[in-house]
Amino acid sequence: MKTNFFEQISTFAFEGNMLLNIHNDNKGQLTVSVVLRNGEISATAGNTLPPMTIGGTATELDEGFFTELATPVKQTIGLVNNLETYQKELEKAKNKNTANSKKVKTADEAGEDNDSDEANDLFAQQADDKQAKAEKKRFFDEAMERAKELAKQMKYTEALAQLPDPTDYPEQVETLNKRRKEIQAGKETYDKLTQQFND
């Protein structure tokens, strides 16, 4: 049997990872969650994008999956590209600002002022690190909260898709694995109850 599934996916022309999560219920309904991730984006910026979710029977998805997915994927790719461009421009601005601050310093001011400027740069770097860590923590907390809320609504597949990638948060691997197991256990229980109810 020949399919053109991967040919269709390649028409989206995205860079990075496309994560597909397919849930099949006992009524013949499939729910497909699609998440785009790009390694070029900082660990926090691109991981807050919600999954694109499409549902229907296998026949309906065969007929309309790529049509339904085309517009959200293009919008997401545009957003991801904008994030990449923004991050590159931000980095250029930081580098330019650093270079300009070094040029402003004259040879006459190089004496004792040099020590205070180095101290100021050190504190500025620490402030940037603190801000980046705070932003990363905020994105982690938001993703964990979204996963928790989705699990409460018994949308276990979507909740699993919302969990942050453990490679982006190595210090939170234990927490992520625990939450993943909890959601997976809830999903399995829900699936068993649904199966029993339908039998």
Image: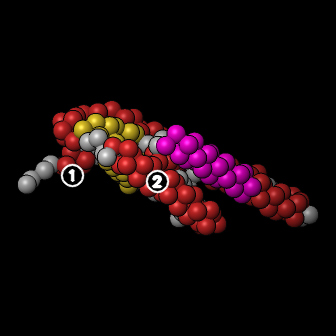
Q: Are marks 1 and 2 in contact (CB under 8 Å)?
A: no
Question: Does label 1 or label 2 sit earlier along the sequence?
Answer: 1
Residue 120's place in the image compared with 78, above or below, is below
In this rendering, does residue 129 appear at all? yes
Q: Position of residue 74 (x, y in %)?
A: 35, 37
| Residue at (40, 53) in percent of width and height | 192
Left or right: residue 68 versus residue 94 is left
Q: Which residue is mark 2?
A: 189
Quadrant including the N terminus: bottom left
How dense is the environment of label 1, judged by Cα within 10 Å: few (below 14), some, or many (20 and up)? few
Residue 60's place in the image compared with 138, above or below, is above
Left or right: residue 28 versus residue 153 is left
* Amino acid of disc 1: Phe
How dense is the environment of label 2, judged by Cα within 10 Å: few (below 14), some, or many (20 and up)? few
- Report helix, strand or loop for mark 1: helix
Residue 154's place in the image compared with 95, above or below, is above
Q: Position of residue 17 (x, y in %)?
A: 38, 55
Q: Main secondary structure of the magenta part?
A: helix
- Report helix, strand or loop for mark 2: helix
| Residue at (50, 53) in percent of width and height | 186
Q: Position of residue 42 (x, y in %)?
A: 55, 53
| Residue at (40, 39) in percent of width and height | 52
Residue closer to the observer: 178 or 176? 178
Q: Which residues are magenta?
A: 128-154
| Residue at (56, 43) in percent of width and height | 152
Residue 171's place in the image compared with 40, above or below, is below
Residue 6's disc number: 1
Q: Compute the Cα span from label 1 to label 2.
A: 33 Å
* Amino acid of disc 2: Thr
